[in-house]
Image (cartoon, grey):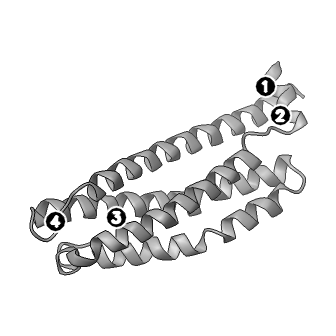
Amino acid sequence: MATAHSTTLARWQRIEALVHGWLEQRQRIIVLLCKIQGLRGFEETRPRSIQIQVQEFCQLLMDYISAGYFEIYQELVREARQFSQGQPVIAQHLLSQMDDSTAEALAFNEDFDTRDHCISQLAQLPERLTLLTEMLEERFALEDQLILSVHQQPAPRQRAVMTH
């Protein structure tokens, strides 16, 4: 029996480490987004510098979204199925609400991911950043709900493991 509890705790700790690293990645995205938004006169001032920062932002954003879909969300849904009754339905509902922000992030990346794309669309950058920021705020709130509804509320078996 102790082996099952140890395995459960180890799995929870592994998911906790994954989520923690992913949220640190989110923080880097927010910082870079704020830095880019703080720049003024995109077309007149240092388009090369802006382009480099926007490309870095696109790469971080794509890495974050990919890690979410292909690793974090799957682990959280598995955890919900294993430990929580009703939580897989909540998890699936929250994930489906992220589709619009995913589409906007992919479109933003497609429009600004290369030097030529970024330079040719520099005039639209402020408006696109505003829209993307709004979508990401909503997405981050949904992701937080997902984490809190599945991962931060251990099932009775988990509580027993973590208190011993």
| Sequence order check, earlier mark of 3 and 1 | 3
| Sequence order check, earlier mark of 3 and 2 | 3
Q: What residue sits right under mark 2 in the picture? A: 158
User: Which of label 3 and label 4 is nearer to you?
Assistant: 4
The type of residue carrying mark 2 is Gln
The span from disc 3 to disc 2 (Cα, nearest Å) is 38 Å
Secondary element at image label 4:
loop
How far across and down, in percent of the image, does residue 59 sit?
A: 34, 61
- Looking at the image, do the residues carrying marks 3 and 2 touch, with CB atoms under 8 Å apart? no
How far across and down, in percent of the image, does residue 106 sit?
A: 43, 74
How far across and down, in percent of the image, does residue 82 sit?
A: 83, 50
Q: Pick whichever, 73 or 153, lies toward us.
A: 153
Q: What residue sits right under mark 1 in the picture? A: 162
The span from disc 2 to disc 1 (Cα, nearest Å) is 6 Å
| Sequence order check, earlier mark of 1 and 4 | 4
Which residue lies at the image location 50% right of the left edge and 42% below the top edge? 21
The type of residue carrying mark 4 is Gly
The type of residue carrying mark 1 is Met
Q: For residue 41, which numbered disc appears in the image?
A: 4
Q: Is residue 52 above or below residue 102?
A: above
